[in-house]
Image: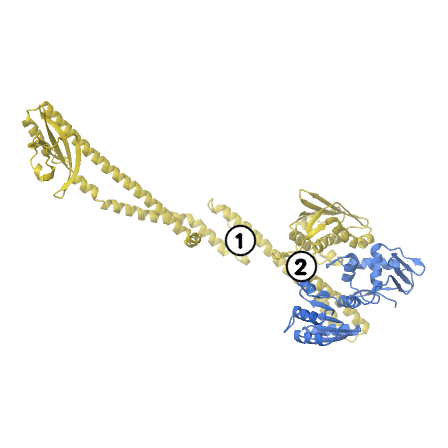
Chain colours: A blue, B yellow
């Protein structure tokens, strides 16, 4: 998977490069708009991460140019411009997602994975991780032979973690996906919800599936 | 319209003192002129009336004398001749002339022909003098009033009598208006000076007020104007001014408090970051220890980031041009979403969250949820285990009312007025533990303000807190 990062702030570009490379992506970096547009139009990328305020050529112009040549290219805006109208403009111009700085890297990663997954494989109705089985249609979760007695929100939380198996999900992303809470809120709530879910999913069993990644969020995987 | 603007601009540039002085003087001058002119004309009128009256009386007495002492021309002559000499010191110097029916002069006061021009001779052959007439004329630089009347001087014979009054003296007096002009000018000038003096006296307290106000600077905001020393008209201004100073001073104090609080809020996480990083770099540590420090640092960064996000939200909400996108919200549904989010936390402490009622309002969904979220989060933090939180939605008089009450630890009354101040914490130690930034309620307040709503908070320590929100539909 190749990702192009168009970002003029060197430190940001460097850590994005490091983080994404370590997550298994091939990363190219352009630190001005003209180079960015050249790379984006002459090579194939699975995803382009675009800043708005760029030297020589701004992000708004670049996305319009890219869309002309590659209507199906995936573009994610990553910018300090957090006004609602900027967000709307970015999405109207054809961006697939819009993330405001400062952001948690784990959240960027989760969003990138969501974008790259989009349109490729159909989400399966049954999820199986180790001895955890989730039947999304029947709203049933079992571990081994034991039926897990979950509230609807706990079930939604477990489904989210299981669908993103191995991905670290930030508290913000969890709050957004499960409770539709799209603002900066008291994220202790997510910790409490995860703790209660763990009591039901992990506590009675030997091998734990839900893990805390300190400072970043939660991940469901076999360890 | 344009002219009017120019005029008002021009007027506003001239000082009130000058304006009042000029208006006073013009008014006084006009008044004086009108009165003077009126009196002048009235005096002249009275004088002339007296003249006419005098002449009419003379004519009548001569007519009477002629009728009754028809032949006694000598006596009449004596009287006619004597009259002007008697009146030689009086302003009433007059001359008499009597014509017979053939236009011949019967009797006349000596020198009458010197003062009467030839054209005043009457030719009675053509017509009779039928009625009394008056005539003005000037002759040899003198002014005269002439009266002419029919006269019956013997049986069946009608002649005419002429009496001439020398009015040169009156004329000279009345036509010499020099003194009048000087008097008018003097009074106009004195009204100008008096006007200036009075206005200056009147405006003095305004200058005093300006002086006091000038002395007030950022460092001496505690100074006040003494309204008692001001006249009645300026008293409300002084009071209003003091009230404005009160408001400025309080917001100034708040601003100072706010910036020092902000510095303090930022210093804590930055201090932690510096300290932890310095210590871990001073010696070699295991990877695990480095990881621990980095994770701890990450938490501090997130704290700073959250603080910045909240600050940005508040400063943007205060921007007067901010226009939020509003849709029709189902209040119950919005509250349900947020309550569900906090359900797990409430279950932990076995606190029941209940909500009931129905209403719709125009608002921004994200902001509305954030507001409810901040309030619920506070209530959950400060409510004991097994407590309750109740949300009531109601709609009446086109107002949507949302009441959120809990039976938590409450807020001491002395803290209540300040809970919407940024970074204000009822108990700093407790809030640090519960992880708040001290911006929760200020954000709630700013969201309420953005929705043209109203928020009140009441509380009884150890019994609970009630927050009441009112919104226009």
Q: Is residue B318 visible?
A: yes
Give residue B390's position: percent from left, percent from top: 76, 47
Q: Label 1 marks which chain's residue?
A: B
Of the numbered discs in the image, which one, if any, rests on residue B313?
2
Quadrant in which the C terminus of chain A appears? bottom right
Give residue B426's position: percent from left, percent from top: 70, 53
Instruction: Answer left or right for B182 relative to B303.
Output: left
Instruction: Answer left or right for B179 relative to B430.
Output: left
Q: Are marks 2 and 1 in contact (CB under 8 Å)?
A: no
Real-space CA distance between mark 2 and mark 1, rounded to the nearest whole angstrom? 35 Å
Give residue B407's position: percent from left, percent from top: 76, 47
Of the numbered discs in the image, which one, if any, rests on residue A16?
none
Q: Is residue A28 depicted above or below A211 in this figure?
A: below
Q: Is residue B251 depicted above or below B138 in this figure?
A: below
**Residue labelled with disc 1:** B223
* Sooner in the amino-acid sequence: mark 2 or mark 1: 1
Q: Residue at x 28, y 48 (%)?
A: B185
Q: Which residue is most to the right?
A: A145
SS of the residue at dot 1? Answer: loop
Mark 2 against mark 1, which lies toward the viewer?
2
SS of the residue at dot 2? Answer: helix
Q: Residues within 10 Å of mark 2 (few under 14, many from 20)?
A: some
Q: Residues within 10 Å of mark 1 (few under 14, many from 20)?
A: some
**Residue A51: quadrant of the picture:** bottom right
């Amino acid at each position: 998977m190749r990702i192009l990062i168009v970002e003029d702030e060197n430190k940001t570009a460097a850590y994005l490069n490091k983080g994404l490379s370590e997550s298994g992506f091939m990363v190219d970096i352009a630190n001005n708009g003209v180079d960015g547009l050249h790379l984006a139009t002459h090579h194939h990328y699975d995803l382009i991460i675009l800043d708005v305020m760029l030297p020589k050529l701004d992000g708004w112009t670049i996305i319009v140019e890219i869309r002309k040549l590659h209507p199906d290219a995936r573009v994610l805006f990553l910018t300090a411009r957090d006004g609602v109208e900027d967000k709307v403009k970015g999405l109207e111009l054809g961006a697939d997602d819009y993330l405001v700085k400062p952001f948690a890297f784990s959240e960027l990663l989760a969003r990138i994975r969501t974008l790259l997954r989009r349109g490729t494989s159909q989400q399966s109705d049954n999820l199986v991780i180790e001895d955890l089985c989730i039947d999304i249609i029947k709203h049933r979760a079992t571990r081994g032979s034991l039926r897990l007695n979950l509230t609807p929100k706990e079930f939604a939380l477990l489904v989210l973690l299981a669908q993103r198996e191995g991905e670290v999900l930030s508290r913000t992303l969890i709050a957004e996906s499960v409770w539709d809470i799209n603002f900066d809120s008291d994220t202790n709530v997510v910790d409490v919800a995860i703790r209660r879910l763990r009591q039901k999913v992990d506590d009675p069993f030997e091998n734990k599936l839900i893990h805390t990644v300190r400072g970043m969020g939660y991940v469901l995987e076999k360890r | 319209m344009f002219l009017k603007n120019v005029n008002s601009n021009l007027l506003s540039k001239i000082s009130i003192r000058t304006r009042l002085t000029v208006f006073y003087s013009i008014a006084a001058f006009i008044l004086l002129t009108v009165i003077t002119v009126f009196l002048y004309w009235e005096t002249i009128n009275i004088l002339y009336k007296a003249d006419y009256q005098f002449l009419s009386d003379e004519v009548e007495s001569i007519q009477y004398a002629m009728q009754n002492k028809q032949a006694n021309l000598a006596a009449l002559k004596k009287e006619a001749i004597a009259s002007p000499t008697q009146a030689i010191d009086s302003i009433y110097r007059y001359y008499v002339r009597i014509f017979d029916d053939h236009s011949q002069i019967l009797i006349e006061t000596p020198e009458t022909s010197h003062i009467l021009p030839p054209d005043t001779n009457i030719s009675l052959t053509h017509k009779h003098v039928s009625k009394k007439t008056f005539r003005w004329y000037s002759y040899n630089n003198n002014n005269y009033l002439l009266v002419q009347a029919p006269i019956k001087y013997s049986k069946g014979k009608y002649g005419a009598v002429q009496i001439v009054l020398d009015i040169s003296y009156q004329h000279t007096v009345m036509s010499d208006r020099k003194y009048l002009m000087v008097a008018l000018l003097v009074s106009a000038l004195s009204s100008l000076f008096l006007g200036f003096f009075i206005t200056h006296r009147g405006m003095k307290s305004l200058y005093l007020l300006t002086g006091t106000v000038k002395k007030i600077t950022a460092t001496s905001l505690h100074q006040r104007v003494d309204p008692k020393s001001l006249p009645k008209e300026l008293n409300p201004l002084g009071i209003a001014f003091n009230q404005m100073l009160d408001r400025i001073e309080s917001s100034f104090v708040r601003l100072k408090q706010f910036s020092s609080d902000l510095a303090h809020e930022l210093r804590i996480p930055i201090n932690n970051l510096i300290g932890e990083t310095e210590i871990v770099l001073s010696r070699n540590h295991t990877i695990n220890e480095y990881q621990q420090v980095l994770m701890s640092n990450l938490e501090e960064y997130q704290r700073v980031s959250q603080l910045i996000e909240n600050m940005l939200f508040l400063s943007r909400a205060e921007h007067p041009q901010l226009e939020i996108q509003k849709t029709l919200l189902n209040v119950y549904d919005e509250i349900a979403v947020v309550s569900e989010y906090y359900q797990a936390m409430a279950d932990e402490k076995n606190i029941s969250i209940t909500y009931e009622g129905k209403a719709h309002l125009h608002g921004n969904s994200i902001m509305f949820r954030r507001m409810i979220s901040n309030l619920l989060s506070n209530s959950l933090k400060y409510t004991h285990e097994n407590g309750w939180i109740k949300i009531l939605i109601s709609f009446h008089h086109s107002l949507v009312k949302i009441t959120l009450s809990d039976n938590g630890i409450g807020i001491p009354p002395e803290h209540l007025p300040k809970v919407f101040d940024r970074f204000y914490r009822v108990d700093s130690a407790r809030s640090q533990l519960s992880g708040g930034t001290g911006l929760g309620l200020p954000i709630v307040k700013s969201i309420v303000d953005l929705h043209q709503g109203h928020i009140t908070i009441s509380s009884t320590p150890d019994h609970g807190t009630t927050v009441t929100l009112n919104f226009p539909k």
